[in-house]
Image (cartoon, rainbow, N blue to C red):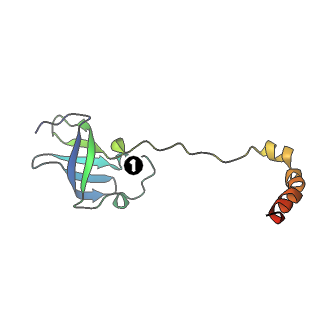
Amino acid sequence: MEYKIGQVVQGIITGIQPYGAFVKVDEETNGLIHISEISSGFVSDVHSFVKQGEKIVVKIIDIDKKTKQLRLSLKAIQPPRKKKISYRIEKTAINQLGFNVLKDMLPLWIQKEIGK
């Protein structure tokens, strides 16, 4: 079968190495998912993402013209990661507010709880 870059295909994991996972796409075509293409997050161990014999869906990101082997990606078909939201308050803002806000509000909060 003729494959194209950008095509999404199904395959079976045939081997796992520290640098990536080998995938059999059909009887004549194999490919490699390099560790950098496993996930958009940090990957310390390929085994924690795929298992030998597992059926997976991957995207073709390159094709070696000589060997016809495929370069595959799992992360290319994953939904984009949400941006991490930072909940840090600027240090200067804390210094300006101090604990006076808590001190001033505490009696009101206590009264509100007692009034329930």
Q: Is residue 88 above or below residue 55?
A: above
Q: Where is residue 103 in the image (x, y as percent from the top left)?
A: 89, 56
Position in image of residue 40 (x %, y %): 42, 46
* In the foreground, 107 or 41: 107
The residue lying at 59 percent from left, 45 percent from top is 85
| Residue closest to the far front | 116
Q: What element carries label 1?
A: loop
Picture quarter with the N terminus: top left
The image position of residue 113, as x and y in percent, is 80, 63
Mark 1 neighbour class, 10 Å CA radius: few under 14, some 14 to 19, many 20 or more: some
At x 86%, y 50%, the residue is 101
Q: Quick check: 88 left or right of 47? A: right
Name the amino acid type tagged 1. Answer: Ser
Residue 3 vs residue 81, the one in the foreground: 81
Does residue 4 sit above or below 91 in this rendering?
Answer: above
Residue 90: percent from left, percent from top? 75, 43
Where does the C terminus fall, quadrant-wise?
A: bottom right
Q: In which quarter of the image is residue 8?
A: top left
Drawn side of residue 4 relative to residue 75, left or right: left
Tally of numbered tags:
1
Task: Name the residue that disc number 1 marks.
Answer: 39
Would you say 86 lies left or right of 79 here? right
- Residue at point 12% right, 36% down? 2
